[in-house]
Image (tube, rainbow, N blue to C red):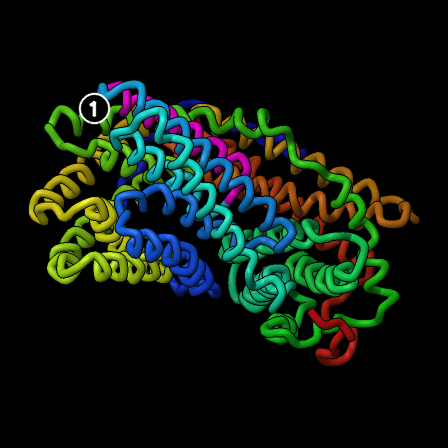
Amino acid sequence: MSSASPTSGTSPVRRLSLAGVLRLRRPSEIWFKPALSSVAAVAPPNLLLLALGRLDLAMYTMAGSLCALYAHNRPYAARARTLAWVVLGMIGGLAAALVTASLTRDAVVLVTVGALLAAVQKALCDATRVGPPGNVVLTFISSAALFVPQSLGQIPGHLALAAAAGVWAWLVGMAPAPIRPHGPERRATAQALNAAAAYAAAHGTGADEDHAPARAAGYAAVQAAWQTLLALPATGARATTRQALERLVVRAEVALAAPADTDPERLRAWAHALRGAGRIPRTGDAPADTDELLGVDAELAARPAPLWRRLGPLAPIAARTALGCALAGYASLALGIGRPYWALVTAAALYQANLTLTWSRAVQRVVGNLAGVLLFAAIAPLAHLGQALLVLCCLALNFGAEALITRNYWLGSVCVTPMALLVTEFAGYQATGDLMTERAVDTVVGALVGFLAAVVVTNRRAGNRVEQAVTAADRARERAARLLAEPAPAPGALEAARRGLAVALTDLRATADGAAGEWWGRALPQERVVLAERSGHRTLAEAVRRQAVRPDRGAGTRTEDVRP
């Protein structure tokens, strides 16, 4: 363990930078899947309500339909469970909002309940790592429902509509399973291979520190691939496919530990072969691969920490969300805006892992929403020609939002904003100018007040978590080093220790990055972090050499006789 000690004192405030905040990225490989799923889930209920002349009920069906946005990166067995929990969570939040709306019309009480619901939704989504779009959709529905006049007798029917649409969204999310049942795990494995290839290709072109971001991204992709594969059944018809993909993830992991001995083009060729429905590439001779997979049982035996323990570190983020959403709603009420939930949702959408990322999201939200208000001005005349056109415009914007949001959050918001404005007109057309003014004011108010709340509520636990992550990485390295010192460690023990060290180093980098974006906390133990990472990665490379594993063993890119 390093003897370097952390420095003391308080870290200074960081400069609020705009560099790169609005820069467009490459679209996600599966950008079209959530976009198409959203349209497929929203269109039938909305068109049915249109035919029945009850578009005023669309908010309740959309609550269930929008659940189709979740879990597109998960294997189908895990996706089924995740989508079911999302639907239940959506209905639970909607039920709480509707009951509150039926019991009181006091706007201050409604905003307070909305802020508390937003904090709970944020904490649960982060703790369970449900993935995009996170808590924002849940908060949008529950906050809007708070301000819809309601009676207790109407609630069962409205919840039934949401539940029916949620079941349809679940079916939409699971629809690709019969066509390409192994698609998510193949994509996750390909991403790990490509990330490892990028690091291996860059290695040797400069100082090792210059490639630390690529190495961290590679390990994160490998860990994501492991989590995806370990969600699959270990026995049965799908086990053979899982084992073939595990061998490829092992190769990506080995490449990260020993980049100098890696052929990046071979990794890229394996990743390319995983596209579509072709055979899964072989990595080399079967005995060596079988030995490498010793230790997978150790991964399978690991269980996530209890939910209450995962919620603990999220307390500052939850507090930020509750305070920021409440103050944003109160400010909107003070300005006389009729829809304070817009400001509340804007604040809820800001909060990220640290204050620096929250600032970036605030800028993206304001730019995207204000541009979206202008787009609404152009679309509104067409949408007001008839309710059918209103529904079709919403569907088109729904698709655009999901198709563009992976390029940058602000670009997706350009479509989300006019869609949300048009949804408010399902019960009747409204003055376009008034809607635009209210949405623009609420966006600015929500972003400003929400960010100020994030500045006030400091996350002083971030430094402690870095200390804990450094200690965990040091212990994992020591365990691997002890096994390396043994002439004949137990079967699978060294492999399990190597994977445990890789996990610890990945967590250390993520924790350090998150803490580095916070303000006003005590200075981080940067020296210990650097030393822990350097020694840990040296031990990983030594473990690779000890096992005499090389990514370039075998000939060419042969394939397993495994079909998806």
- Find disc 1 in the rendering and name its residue: 330
Looking at the figure, which quarter contains the C terminus?
Answer: bottom right
Image quarter of residue 105: top left
Q: Residue furthest front?
A: 52
Residue 307: horizontal and vertical position, in percent? 59, 29
| Of the pair 555 and 181, the residue shown nearer to us | 181
Residue 50 part of the magenta segment: no
* Residue at 66% over, 62% down: 252
* Residue 196 visible to an observer of this rendering: no
Is the residue 397 above or below the residue 482 in the image? below
Residue type, label 1 = Tyr
Q: Which residues are magenta?
A: 108-130
Image quarter of residue 412: bottom left
Is the residue 341 above or below the residue 237 in the image? above
SS under mark 1: helix
Q: Residue furthest right?
A: 488
* Residue at 18% over, 39% down: 444
Residue 118 part of the magenta segment: yes
Residue 409: horizontal and vertical position, in percent? 33, 52
Q: Along the horizontal axis of the image, is 190 left or right of 386?
A: right
Residue 541: horizontal and vertical position, in percent? 71, 55
| Of the pair 144 and 526, the residue shown nearer to us | 144
Residue density around tag 1, few if under 14, some if 14–19, many if 20 or more, within 10 Å: many
Q: Along the horizontal axis of the image, is 217 left or right of 453?
A: right
* Residue 34 visible to an observer of this rendering: yes
| Of the pair 308 and 102, the residue shown nearer to us | 102
| Of the pair 159 and 377, the residue shown nearer to us | 159
